[in-house]
Amino acid sequence: MIVEIDRVRFAWKTGRRDILDITRLEIAAGERVFIEGPSGSGKSTLFSLLGGVVSPREGTVRVLQADISQMPAARRDRFRADHIGFVFQMFNLVPYLSMMDNVVLPCRFSHRRFERAQTRSGSPEAEARRLLVRLGLEPVELLGRPVTELSIGQQQRVAIARALIGAPELIMADEPTSALDEGARKRFLEVLSEQCDEAGASLLFASHDTRLGALFDRRISLGELNRNGTGMPGQTP
Amino acid sequence: MLRLALLSVLSRRVTAGLTLLAIAISVAMLLGVEKVRRDARGAFANTISGTDLVVGARSGAIQLLLYSVFRIGNATNNISWETYQDIGNFPRVLWTVPISLGDSHRGFRVMGTSGAYFEHYRYARTETLQFDSGGPFVDVFDAVLGAEVANRLGYALGDKIIVSHGAGDVSFVDHDDKPFRVAGILRPTGTPVDRTVHVSVEGFTAMHVDWRAGTPMPGLAITADEARGMDLTPKTITAFLVGLDRKIAIFDVQRRINEYSEEPVLAIIPGVALQELWDLMSVAENLLRFVSAMVVATGLLGMLTVILSSLEARRREMAVLRSVGARPLHVFALFMSEAMVFALAGAAAGVVLLYVALLVGQPIVAREFGLHLPIALPGPGDWWIIAAVVAAGTAAGAVPAIRAYRLSLADGLSMRI
């Protein structure tokens, strides 16, 4: 199991109503899972929980057999850097860093991913270049340009490269396609699945767009899973 | 984190540039005030040495020092030649040099003195006055020019100069019937001597021999040659310098002079009077320092505003950093580093700005205020100021850094827009 959630309750502030109340969730290694649910169903909160940014009020969260809900904050941060790659809806890139610097950023925070990128291609930069070429970004011409000049589709692909560098076991994508048009969305999904397969990473893909679900191994409806989901606009846009 | 901070600052060139400029100007001002203060003290302290006492009509010690040595302000009263002679004969008195003031030449003060002045006057502790060309007065109507007078007015040996009555820049009454001949030009000293026209006390008297009560006597015109034949011993002088054979006697002689019964006179020890002047000035100096420090604080506040106002727009960036494994402490360090980059670069730019200003302003200050500002490397005091500014700037960075820390803790990975 790459992810195991057991009787988890979570509230953003103590005393507030629980946003998440999940009895059980299991995701196997290498699985590509689509998590569907409308805005406010708790997708981003679930990701924060799995990413170890927050801890549950009750219950256990295991990622790669490690009980991250018991870890101190600093270790959770390190764990996230080592084992999880994120792709967000938009604004994935640090605006003042070059494309190259954006992609190798996780290697600066995680020694493990630095080493894995190095083993794979000789250096994090070489690995970044390899990934960017695989993702259809010709880095030679784009490397020097500010990332803010890239199209949104290009930015999202740079974000995939950053999530994949150093081969983390789990990739989490939170509405990564909602800023893309139809054609770009399809290409993005293909590239993402392909790259996760190639890297042997599990993929957790959250979206409100149920049409995308057909492309995944398994679909989970967060509305059904989460006993406290409201479907109201809340934490995320 | 420092590299990230550097790139982040660089990416906001315009706002960062203006913020830097504000800090740089404030640092340059603080360092500049400190420098002018220090150099002014140094210049004043270096102006007179080797003179044990300065004697003049009874007034304030600082006033006497200012008009007799620094050519600032005017004497309220003169002292008689007899008194000068009398005191010159006091025991322990080795030499005396008379000083007569009140006239000017094209904005420069004219000082009547004796040849002994060039022998006994010392500046910068031990330096004596050196002649660049020519020598001391020989004739009654000889003049010795300070370096700056000769330089600015383009005088050479043998030139005739006409002294104006009164010490102002513009005078309506000239002693044009008795021109002086340039007999000597002094080397630069960096003291008020450079801006002085020296004539003999006899020459000074000769100019006024046909004057009574501050105006030329109608119908009485005495030519220079006629004056040469007259007794030109002055009746009064403005002040005189005293050298003693033993330093230990200074207080004794000073007391004796101050108790002199024939005429109310005042003897001052230059160093002591200078100290009194500093005590008087220290209020203004401290005020100036305080204002400069406030300007630095304003510059740093501007920096805080810039960093704080960017915070909202950068919440996404913080979430991205958190997602790749940055701890909230990293985010804190990023913002602290940004403040440090600002403060460091601002202080560095301030130092550069100060030296540019010095290069440009040095000749102007020297000309207008007679203050020579040497361009030297920053002293230990300056480094302390620079270090304090950088430390204060970095510490101020804690305000946005703590806010960013809290935000990144609260936001986590959620991208609030």
Image (cartoon, coloured by chain):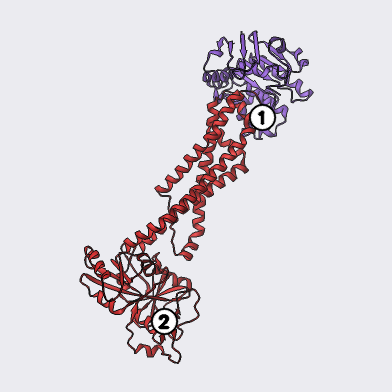
Residues at marks 1 and 2, CA–CA distance in whole angstroms:
84 Å
Give the residue type that dot 2 points to: Phe
User: Color used for chain B?
Assistant: red
Residue B241 coordinates in the image, percent (x, y): 31, 70
Secondary structure, mark 1, is helix
Disc 1 versus disc 2: nearer the observer = 2
Return the chain for callout 2: B
Dots 1 and 2: beta carbons under 8 Å?
Answer: no
Q: Is residue B28 left or right of residue B247?
A: right
Per the image, the residue denoted by label 2 is B180
Per the image, the residue denoted by label 1 is A139
The image quarter containing residue B43 is bottom left
Give the residue type that dot 1 points to: Pro
Residue B31 coordinates in the image, percent (x, y): 46, 50
Q: Residue at x 42, y 45 (%)?
A: B384
Which residue sits furthest bottom? B219
Secondary structure, mark 2, is strand
- Which quarter shows the C terminus of chain B? top right
Return the chain for callout 1: A
Q: Is residue A96 above or below residue B352?
A: above
Residue A137 coordinates in the image, percent (x, y): 69, 27
Q: Is residue B77 left or right of residue B351?
A: left
> Alpha-carbon neighbours of circle 2 within 10 Å: few (<14), some, or many (≥20)?
many
The image quarter containing residue B13 is top right
Which residue sits furthest left? B91
Q: Residue at x 43, y 52 (%)?
A: B286
Q: Which chain is purple?
A: A
Residue B170 visible from this viewpoint: yes
Q: Residue at x 41, y 90 (%)?
A: B222
Residue A153 coordinates in the image, percent (x, y): 73, 27
Q: Is residue B263 left or right of residue A169?
A: left
